[in-house]
Image (cartoon, helix red, strand yellow):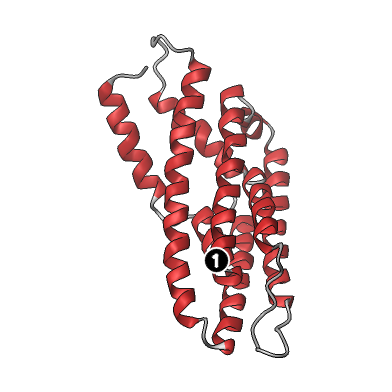
Amino acid sequence: MPSTELLIAFFATTAIFAYIPGPAMLYAAGQTVARGRWSGLTAALGIHLGGYFHVFAAAAGLSVLFHAVPPLYMAVKLFGALYLIWLGVCLFRKRADGETGLPVIERKSARRAFFESITVEVLNPKTAIFFMAFLPQFIDASAALPVWLQFVALGTIVNLMFSSADIACVFLAGAMVARLRRSGRAQRLMQRAGGTVLVGLGVHVALQRS
């Protein structure tokens, strides 16, 4: 395994990256605001599982393909951005319950958030680029463990730390939702806020050049 000094630097740097607000945190918060805490947590779980796609892809060298073939990188990035925008528009189009004035939350919303979040994370090439650029800084080619196994081990730690930040964000957003839930108008505004976050995130990803 890498030296103790290298591991300390790895954990410190990962923690800094994990708790800086980013797309995954915003996505989980948006799902929480729009659909409730349970949907936010299942979305965080989906993001976590989707992250392993990029961990193993980095270990296999797949993200090198994104560097070598820029059109492929752009195609995947734009497809993921359009998917985020579509999810946000769907939240805007949801109708409210005629009796209570509250938005209709489907029974399968949490399950849908789970599968949607896996798709969002898998279609995010920037995550692949991050793992490919970040993890090699802490790989020790002279260590007893094979390089690919070091990639998987360190990538798993990174994914777990990022997920801890996503979950913390869900609970913060959930606390805000609980205070506003009494008001039907506030509930509708929260749903629109969640849709706005997703659309804005998709537009931001689509307009980024790198």
Q: Which residue is mark 1?
A: 32
- Using the image, determine if residue 197 lies above or below residue 94: above
Front position in the image: 156 or 178: 178
Image location (x, y in percent) of residue 125: 62, 42
As helix, strand or loop, the secondary structure at mark 1 comes to helix
Residue drawn at x 61%, y 31% as measured from the top left: 63
Left or right relative to 103: residue 126: left
Q: Is residue 6 visible?
A: yes
Quarter of the image where one finds residue 61: top right
What is the crowding at mark 1: few (fewer than 14 residues within 10 Å), some, or many (at least 20)? many
Q: Does residue 210 appear in the picture of this structure?
A: no
The spot of residue 14 in percent (x, y) is 38, 40
Q: Is residue 117 above or below residue 90?
A: above
Which residue sits at x=66%, y=80%? 103
Give x and y (percent) for residue 199. Answer: 64, 67
Considering the image in quadrants, where does the N terminus appear?
A: top left
Instruction: Please state if 72 lies on the left or on the right of 191 as rendered.
Output: right
Position in image of residue 138 (x %, y %): 39, 25
- Furthest residue to the left? 5
What residue type is disc 1 on? Thr
Number of numbered discs visible in the structure rendering: 1
The residue lying at 65 percent from left, 34 percent from top is: 66
